[in-house]
Amino acid sequence: MKKLSARRRHPLAALVVLLFALAATGGLYAAFAPADEAKADTSAQSLAIEEGKKLYATGCSSCHGTGGQGTSDGPSLVGVGAAAVDFQVGTGRMPAQSPGAQAPDKPRVYDQKEIDQLAAYIASLGPGPSIPTEEDYNPSGADSAAGGELFRTNCAQCHNFTGKGGALTHGKYAPPLNDVDPKYVYEAMLHGPQNMPAFPDSVMPPEEKREIIAYLQDVNGKETASPGGFGLGGFGPVAEGMFAWTIVLALLICTAVWVAARTAKARKS
Amino acid sequence: MSSHTGTHEDENLPGERETAHGEVANRENPFADPGLPPHEPRKQDIDERAAKRSERTVALLFTVSMLATIGFIASYVIFPIDQMVTIWPLGKISALNFSLGMTLGIALFCIGAGAVHWGRTLMSDHELIGERHPIEADEETKQKVLADFHQGAKESQIGRRKLVRNTMFGALALVPLSGVVLLRDLGPLPEDKLRHTAWAKGKMLVNQNTGEPLRPEDITVGTLAFAQPEGLEEGSHDFQKEIAKAAVMLVRLEPNDIKDKRELDWSHEGIVAFSRICTHVGCPVTLYEQQTHHVLCPCHQSTFDLADGARVIFGPAGHPLPQLRISVNDEGYLVAEDDFAEPVGPTFWERG
């Protein structure tokens, strides 16, 4: 040891220590790093892509092109990301039943495993938003009042201020958001399906998306209480006025006519 | 009618209906007033048991109303304000609202229904004619009024003293002018406020969601972002007044898709900023369809093509949406190059 301590002021000592430290770090990393797992993951991923490619070829390629490049019947899917696939196929909007202004949601055709495979394939075509995780979109604890403000600024113009949906041009429409799975709400905001604009994280951070989902669950969820009990679709004063002026007024007029009508006579004429 | 004569029912009927009252006109005057149809008695008029039944029905309705009022007071006391119950087919609703509304509704309805039933079955239903008195006054009253008027005019000497008469007319004609002048106090003149917004050269575009200034890379193709000028504090005194004019929406188009040359010049890498205020009557117009680049106004369906200088392609709007000229500052943030070149929002007389 004396020999070692005597050389500790040697000009090259620092270099030697540095080399030792680097070797130790590298060795430790090699020992602990999940090298095999990473390899297995990649192969599972590439397997999913392979399977997804097959599903894509049979189910999607007639409109979106054999390589996802798009045709006159369907837009390019390069760079739309896994979130878009999970949303469109998961809500049954894709595969579309027929060409038209807008593909409506309907019972889904593929199961979640197939959707994930399709998503893996589309994601491999170009970088795009990936499928959010549970903790991204779980609204518990999010500030639904702030979400309401965000919803009115960003979403209410098309979806109505309680998410009841509304009409757009040429047969397009903003769908009602009753009971939509938070995952799909999150994905829709992330990538902007069909004619809906996107609200990526750069414009609307994930926390704000969660607040919006919390607001929707408060005003429009399965468990949402409606204190009045007769929301008339929740469209606001227009629907209420319409109801009062047509149905209720007609009822009142009929009653008034009945009250003033001749009463039943003893003799049948 | 006479076919019924002799039935059991007829024996109870009074003879009143046999009178000629209401007989249809004769040959000399085919349009004679037929008068009222003969009065026919109701069952309650001739059968005391039926009348008793009606009486009980009315009393029952009034009693139900009393019970409902007691129910109203009881539910006000019993139910806490935040208790929710599920009632088919209304869903999950407030127990308090529901019970208050139901009981008060029943209470009022039963009073009305009772009164109507009473009126229709028990109160007299003889139809009567109340003659109107003529509108025209009789000759004597007319003469009296005219005489009074002439006497008044003579005694006041209004015809003779022309100076008094004319100055009085002048005074009466001028006095309403003070009211007209006071109309000026209805509000300050707009001056040039309609022509300017809070935007100015170098002002950064601040994301309305986050309060952070926007960078071009934040806005991808298909994104819709809303911006306000930097320095506009939400909650400050004039925030609402300023944001009502300065609200801006940002979208990124492919530069090749932009058909209008000035729009392309005023954009930054395909990012265009347009006023959110409809040029028709000023509704917020942000129903953006990212594939068609159309923006729809929810109020009157004016549609603007953002790929073609926000040209009006449908609806009542008279002008394209004003575009905000934007670029990027040294730190890489989006900034306005100038205020809007034209007034935002609805058109007005002096807009030009």
Image (cartoon, coloured by chain):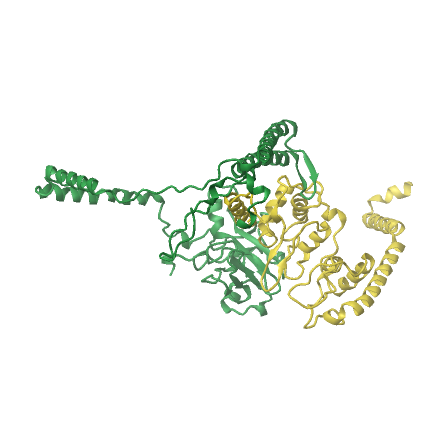
Chain colours: A yellow, B green
Where residue A89 appears, as percent x and y from the top left, is: 75, 60
Residue drawn 65% across and 47% down?
A212
**Residue B270 against residue A8 in the figure, above or below:** below
**Residue B226 against residue B83 in the figure, above or below:** below
Where residue A120 appears, as percent x and y from the top left, is: 79, 61
Q: Residue furthest front?
A: B6
Res B271 seen here: no
| Rendered-image quadrant of the N terminus of chain A | top right
Where residue A155 appears, as percent x and y from the top left, is: 61, 52
**Horizontally, is B185 left or right of A250 in the view?**
left
Q: Nearer the viewer, residue A209 or B76?
A: B76
**Horizontally, is A210 left or right of B256 in the view?**
right
Q: Residue furthest right?
A: A1
Q: Nearer the viewer, residue A263 or B151?
A: A263
Q: Residue furthest left?
A: B160
Res A265 seen here: yes
Dividing the picture into quarters, in which one does residue B91 lie? top right
Residue drawn 84% across and 62% down?
A46
**Residue B84 against residue A12 in the figure, above or below:** above
Give the total of numbered labels. Answer: 0
**Horizontally, is B8 left or right of B322 in the view?**
right
Where residue B267 appears, as percent x and y from the top left, is: 54, 63
